[in-house]
Amino acid sequence: MAVGSISKIPNMVEGSRYCPEIIQQIDSVIGLLKSARTELLRGHLGSCLSERLKNDKEGAVKELLKIYNMK
């Protein structure tokens, strides 16, 4: 879980762990967050967005642009 991995980082820094080990932990957290984002987005596109497109196409497009930082 990302929360547990994130909480390890300050302890590693305070414990003067070797920098590459801390970087590896940070990379692990980034990977976990990217995976969570992908799964959430996949679910959103498959359910929430399809419903929103029916009711508010313009709002749905704006939402997608925001998600992809293209606003």
Image (cartoon, rainbow, N blue to C red):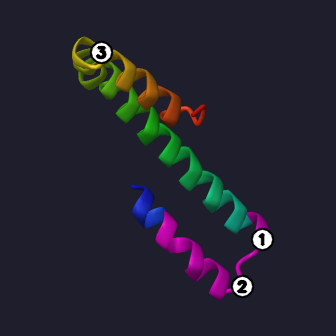
Residue 53: mark: 3
Q: Is the stretch drawn in magenta largely helix, strand or loop?
A: helix
Give the side of residue 42 with respect to residue 27, left or right. Answer: left
Q: Amino acid at mark 2?
A: Ser
Q: Quadrant of the C terminus?
A: top right
In the picture of the structure, the residue carrying the numbered disc 2 is 16
Q: Secondary structure at mark 2?
A: loop
Q: Which residue is mark 1?
A: 19
What x and y, as percent, mark residue 54? 23, 12
Q: Residue at x 42, y 41 (%)?
A: 36
Q: Are marks 2 and 1 in contact (CB under 8 Å)?
A: no
- Specify the quadrant that holds the N terminus: bottom left
Instruction: Kindly identify the amino acid type of the residue bearing the numbered disc 3.
Output: Leu
- Asked if residue 13 lies in the magenta stretch, the reply is yes
Question: Which numbered mark, 3 or 2, is in the foreground of this view?
Answer: 3
Instruction: Please rate how many residues cluster around mark 1, counting C-alpha atoms within 10 Å: few if below 14, some from 14 to 19, many from 20.
Output: few
Q: What amino acid does circle 1 point to?
A: Cys
* SS label for mark 1: helix
